[in-house]
Amino acid sequence: MKIALAQLNYIIGDFDFNTSKIIDTLQSAKAQGADLVVFAELSVCGYSPCDFLDFSEFINQCDESARKIAEACEGIACIIGLPTKNPEIKGKDLYNSAYFIENGKVKSIVNKALLPNYDVFDEYRYFEPAVNFSCIEFKGHKIALTICEDLWNINDNPMYVISPMYELAKENPDFMINIAASPFAYNHDEERVQVLGDNCRKYKMPLFYVNQIGAQTEIIFDGGSLVFDQEGSLLDELPYFQESIKYYSIEKGNILEQNPIIHNPHNDIEQIHDALVLGIKDYFQKSGFSKAVLGLSGGIDSALVCALAAEALGAENVMAVLMPSEYSSNHSIQDALDLVANLGCKHQIIPIKEATAAFESMMKPTFEDLPFNVAEENIQARSRGIVVMAMSNKFGYILLNTSNKSECAVGYGTLYGDMAGAISVLGDVYKTQVYKLAHYINRDKEIIPQNSIVKPPSAELRPGQKDSDSLPDYEILDAMLFQYIELKKSSSELISMGFDEAMVKRILRMVNMAEFKRKQAPPILRVSPKAFGTGRRMPIVAKYRQ
């Protein structure tokens, strides 16, 4: 039997697009002699449709798309993912399902049993978990078909009380197929290989695993579909961050003409770079936009976002706006101009000195003789926000936010100023990672000016200002934030690790106090195992302090 794994990029709710892509792939695979084509979890509607699932018309369109796919599935079989109605009176209205379609008819329906509701997942909000399990018979083979999380209950401390694969194994299947929508995080590929390989070793059977690719707002899918033999040896690994279709032959439980390979992942920074480029590209293309605008300060964060946007959208579609104030240094302006020249993107220079002076004059009767402080600093940042949003409104540009994760964590940003934007490119990238990404961008030639990389970071909102005036060194700060945010370490644990007690308490208080800002920030492209946004839910008003 010849199996095709179809690793594709879907658009949530675009049924014509998704259906056409699936049918085109079916026809291509049929021409290549494939017997079965495997598509990803919720491939018909895209993952995750969230509260679209509450609309009966949305579910009806899923049904109609599945019917069209079935009609095109003559002389070949396929597996597609879609939400289906629960026929029972009790329980949730829907299942997260897989259709096994053969010769124009749905021959089997498999429902997902393990519904994740942690981090970015919220499947139990919508779906009823499966309780019945049965293998699929096809061309003399018995297939154990599961959906994503159903294979993740394999470790010594299981999250769920049942194991779908344990139940399916009682029927002695010949091999496993798992369809997935497994989001990207820079450390997730190795865990994925380990967990799936463990299933093969436990149940002594091969596995075909197909994941989707593409970005759905902040969630990015990296592909990396996998094939294992019955010993858990990795036989093949599809490309990351790109669509791919590949064919395999299996006979009597053995995958033919495939030798074991070594999983050789790209380093974290290369993966983050590729994910961010895909995240920007898909946000624009799937939203129907083409041109981006951002404020370019001469600093490393905005320089990196500008370079990533130029790579994702084409330099000709990126507008960089330089907005010097009376505190902007000459070298910052020159660094920004050098970047623009290196990239070939568009730019405008719009000084904000007159605007901030007008605001300060307007507020003078109210501020009276109070000293210069954060209020005047934020007037500058908000003046810049007004400028780039005016550019957005006038020319149809989409504003890219340039704040990094370190700044987001401690509230080092101005609401309605530098925190403005439609999508946050670096909101899940620590400052230390920003520097590494800049070096990666410059791996073949200088694109980001060296001075933007080596100079002390500064918001340049007052004379001689540096980030180090109010924050620890970023190497220390990021290490502490990683332990607190990603690894959920408490203040006492951080202190026992050697972090200064006073600094720990101050930084954690800053993180907790900045929650109200993050709730108003744009969606953040997720590249880590714990990003701000849907994956980290904290109350704004609370007395608990870790």
Image (cartoon, helix red, strand yellow):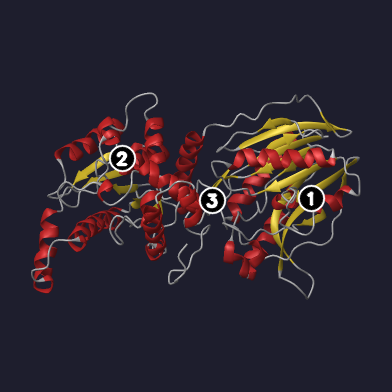
Which quarter of the picture shows residue 387?
Answer: bottom left
> What is the three-letter code of the residue carrying label 2?
Ile
> What is the three-letter code of the residue carrying label 1?
Ile
Instruction: Say left or right for 205 vs 523.
Output: right
Residue 386 placed where, x, y %? 24, 59
> What is the three-letter code of the residue carrying label 3?
Leu
Name the residue nearer the viewer: 494 or 398: 494
* Residue density around tag 2, few if under 14, some if 14–19, many if 20 or more, within 10 Å: many
Element under label 1?
strand
Element under label 2?
helix
Element under label 3?
loop
Residue matched to label 3: 487
Residue mark closest to the camera, 2 vs 1 = 2
Determine which of the numbered discs, if any, sits on residue 101 in the image: 1
Q: Residue at x 28, y 30 (%)?
A: 450
Residue mark closest to the camera, 2 vs 3 = 3
* Mark 2 vs mark 1, CA separation in Å: 52 Å
Residue matched to label 2: 300
* Residue density around tag 1, few if under 14, some if 14–19, many if 20 or more, within 10 Å: many
Which image quarter holds the N terminus?
A: top right
Q: Residue at x 60, y 42 (%)?
A: 188
* Mark 2 vs mark 3, CA separation in Å: 27 Å
Name the residue nearer the viewer: 73 or 260: 260
Q: Are marks 2 and 1 in contact (CB under 8 Å)?
A: no
Q: Which callout, 2 or 3, points at the residue further toward the start of the chain?
A: 2
Residue 283 placed where, x, y %? 46, 50
